[in-house]
Amino acid sequence: MILDKIKQNTLSCIQRQTPFNNLVHDQKNYYLESVTSSAQIIPLYDEQIKLNELNDFKDEIDPNVTYVPNEPDLLEPLFTNQNDNQIIDRLLGCAYGQALGDAYGLSTEFETHDKIKYHYPDASKLIPFPNYITTPHSRRWKRGDWTDDTDQWILLLETLTKGNGDEKIFAMKLKRWIEHGFVELGDFAGMGLGANVQQVVYSNGYLSDPLKVSEIVWERNNRQAAPNGAVMRCSASAFVHYNDLEKVKSTTISMCKTTHFDPRCIASCLAVCLTIAHLIERKFHEKEIESLVKHVQDETINILGDSFSEEHRKLFLWYTDRSRSLQDLELDEAKSIGFTYKCLASGFYGLRSKRSFEETLNDLIRCGGDADTNGAVCGTMYGARYGYKSLPVEWLRAMPYKKWFDQKILECLEQMNLLDTSVIHTQTRF
């Protein structure tokens, strides 16, 4: 079978630590894209295949993961029976803002601002979702689907709820996802794997001591690498432990370090998770957002202490300052699109926005760069502030695997003792 051959060759490249970013294709072949240049590609299969064969395969999935037209949403009873529970609304906003921001951002991921402007010249209009203009990169996913950012968010959620925050359990889940994806969704492997995560996970001893191996890889790279692969998934820590700030801090740090040991990555994750935890608990009044930001900035710097150099602290404050504009961030600058602080700043842009989710995310993803990751963090912070009810219903239902995601979120909420099991009954797929 063609897809078996693709999977076999994909895993072979991973195990050899061949540097690549993503599985890509043209109209004849599938390739692994090099992390250094899109022109450097590794052929995976050399026979002609249909452009949509992979998505045809993904259609052959358990129908329980996808809503059929007019099927009631599994989340509806939450708002019928617990419509005064604002904590539930903000928790769901955090989770679904993440997934929807990720899915919307895929439409312009790795594109430049100028190219996006060419395809969507009227900046006053929204980039359509899910019917955006696909690129060779984005068409590898189903329309409306999220990417690796939310896949790894789910892995983290599972680890914190079922695995008690054990770093080894997360490491095991991450490696399994890389090699298989979510099989119930028709995945053959995890798509979108970043170079840093690949290098860490496939280093000797990772499963037995992920934190130590992550540190070794960081040291080996001269302590220079600070990509956004941890901040993109981190809000799951705030989701699960929103009412226990010490747990938020400890799990945020440990889960970040499983793949990203740099203090800038840790600072990014702490700033996002502490902000979201405060938002969900409403420990700051809605009109005190800048006071909240200042509090989180100070707390993050204090937690990191001497490990946070003066240079890194100054940049952290610069990227989270209220005066930063999207233009300041240069999100499509080729050499730094994956820098963790750029993603962090995208999150704080979402936090501060006073416009609709659609308008907020549209302006962000029009800047290009690592738009799905920036969109995920922007969306999760926006959602934690304004709640699930602020998210566009039509867009939520356009996510092809929302039903599957709903099942996971509902089980998590039950485990957090936030749902009465007599009110909600659902099949889950943890």
Image (tube, rainbow, N blue to C red):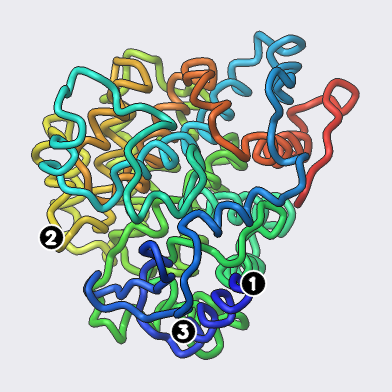
Query: Which mark is first along the chain, 3 or 1?
Result: 3
Q: CA distance from mark 1 to mark 3?
A: 19 Å
Along the line of sight, which residue is nearer the eye, 127 or 425?
127
Q: Amino acid at mark 2?
A: Glu
Labels in figure, total: 3
Q: Please say if 112 is above or below 209.
A: above
Q: Locate residue 86, reporting x and y percent.
A: 59, 16
Could you tell whether 214 is left or right of 176 in the image?
A: left
Q: Which residue is mark 2?
A: 311
In the rendered image, the quadrant that contains the N terminus is bottom right
* Image quadrant in which you'd find residue 407: top right
* Crowd band around label 3 with a 10 angstrom C-alpha radius: few (<14), some (14–19), many (20+): some
Q: Please say if 88 is above or below 161.
A: above
Q: Which residue is mark 1?
A: 172
Along the line of sight, which residue is nearer the eye, 337 or 41?
41
In front: mark 1 or mark 3?
3
Q: Which element type, helix, strand or loop, lies under badge 1?
A: helix
Q: CA distance from mark 3 to mark 2?
A: 37 Å
Residue visible at 30% across and 86% down? 220
Q: Locate residue 167, reporting x and y percent.
A: 60, 67
Q: Which element type, helix, strand or loop, lies under badge 2?
A: helix
Q: Which residue is mark 3?
A: 13
Q: Amino acid at mark 1?
A: Met
Q: Is residue 318 visible?
A: no
Q: Locate residue 308, reporting x and y percent.
A: 25, 62
